[in-house]
Amino acid sequence: TYRWCLTRGEAVRDAQRQPIRMLGSLTDITAHKQAEETSKDLRRHLELQIAEMPFGYIVWNAEFRIASWNPAAERIFGYTAEEAIGQHGSLLLPEALHSQIAEIWNRLLAGDQTAHSVSENLTKDGRHIICQWTNTPLRIGTGPIICAFSMVADITAQKQSEAVLAAVHEQIRQMQKMEALGQLAGGIAHDFNNLLAAILGNAELTHAKLATDHPAQPNLARILEASDRASQLVQQILAFTHQQPAHRTVQSVGPVLVEAGALLRATLPAGIVFTVTVDAATPPVLADASQLHQVLMNLCTNAWHAIGDRPGTIAVTLAPVMCTQPLLGFQTTLPPGRYVHLSVRDTGHGMDPETVQRIFEPFFTTKPVGQGTGLGLSVVYGIVERHDGVLLVESQLGQGTTMHLYFPAVEALAPADAQPVPLEGRGRHLLLLDDEVLLVEVGQAKLEARGYRVTGCTSPTEAVNAVRADPGGFDGVVTDYNMPEQSGLDVARALAQIRADLPVVLVSGYLSPTVQAEALAAGVAALLPKPVKASQLAITLARLFDAPPQAEAATRERP
């Protein structure tokens, strides 16, 4: 066998100093050499394991400089081992954290065992990332720490996913609150609309009884106008809380801006100068007024946040424009043509090109945590897109931002011909159903004043029994939707079983799209918002009966 030996010796010399033999020792060091080889193998294995680690592995010397750097660390931070080794730990920290370097290093050295932390770090290409660190100091015996080992993982994507998930959860909570608010608003609107209907009905009756030059007529006109505005306000609240789909009509944008501007002026800080400029020549557009209102509120709120606590200006302008070239917007292109141009300009901090490219992404926000969900501009973009429009952004850091919105112009509606006088009731027999006695009395008086015979009921059961007792005795039914015993839709279904051709008019302060579809499927002839003007109800009834007086006299005789 072969052994590893360590030999020591010297020559034994004679009187003439010539070597005659060797004197020395031989030590078997085979075990030591085997241990040495094993140590080398372990070192090579350890180096291979460190190189193949999915986590960054960094060794820091006592001066907080990089002594070792594996490939994973290179992938995370972008520096090669040659670039990183010897560099100070500040290389991996954003400038804002440089003042805390001594504290970070002392905190790492103060521990006698492994410590975990999460921090913001900086890559070679200037990106800010979130990293999770596992740090272990190394000391010999009870002596000072001679170095520290760190394992690091880039958890930026995980943190972003957590932020998105939190934003989604917040959105769900907001939706749940909106749903609850919608249910509450629906209940309040029912009672409020009943009060409005009573006010409106009595005002209409008084208006009809008094001479046109009576001194009270102007006051009645104000009551009717205020009732209309109150009814529209309730409809806006319900539309917002129930998230109704867009109901686009041909209309001018100017009045929407003026109304939203009045609300914004009351909420913006005194240091912000807010102006709304509307060109009177601006053509109408096909739009949902409530959604345009939401667009302006979101854009102006963003402008306000961009200005912050400093004095600034928010300028809203509306004007017609003729585009001779295609409009290239965010993921949308519109052909040349005539457009309505709405712009919102602010003197805020502005945005860099990279931020501009992302502002319409859902959940993207540049605001601190807790000050924004990142949904505002994505909602604006969705509304503009649904209105066949385009959105352009003009912004520079330190120079403010201007949002340009373009909507296709449409031809103004031709003036409507004078509305024909609604046909009088001519003795037709109506069943009027409402759970409020006052509304039944007012409605009965209004309809009888137009020549109808009216049977009033305050109970769904009473109304259904009345028709069942005399199916051919009624020409039509007007019923409220929201009632304690049964809904107006339930009444319509029950009446359809008794007499399928009996026209039913359903009245309500709010009817969801689902209920509207069910009403049409049940054969309801017309849906009217509550409170209903006498003229509106008379026109609807006339259209349902659709029989001129001459034809009616020839086809139907009434006792």
Image (tube, grey):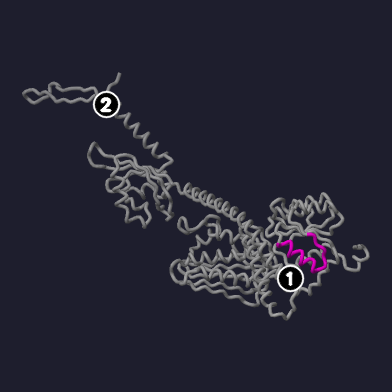
Q: Nearer the viewer, residue 57 or 344?
A: 344
Q: Can you tell which quarter of the image residue 221 is in? A: bottom right
| SS state under label 2 | helix
Of mark 2 and mark 1, the one earlier in the sequence is 2
Which percent across, then down, holds residue 116? 37, 43
Which percent across, then down, holds residue 18? 10, 25
Q: Amino acid at mark 2?
A: His
57 sits to left or right of 525: left
Q: Nearer the viewer, residue 142 or 169?
A: 169
Residues shaded magenta: 438-455
Which percent across, then down, holds residue 206? 72, 72
Is residue 194 one of those drawn in magenta?
A: no
Residue placed at 48% from the left, 71% from the top? 272
* Image quarter hosting the N terminus: top left
Q: Which mark is residue 32?
A: 2
Q: Can you tell which quarter of the image residue 140 is in? A: top left
Q: Which mark is residue 205?
A: 1
Q: Tag 1: Cα neighbours inside 10 Å, few (<14), some, or many (≥20)?
A: some
Q: Amino acid at mark 1?
A: Leu
Residue placed at 30% from the left, 47% from the top? 107
| SS state under label 1 | helix
92 sits to left or right of 61: right
346 sits to left or right of 90: right
Vertical side of 315 occupied by 141: above or below: above
Residue farthest along the left direction in this orientation: 15
Report the Cα–Cα distance between label 2 and label 1: 116 Å
Vertical side of 158 occupied by 558: above or below: below
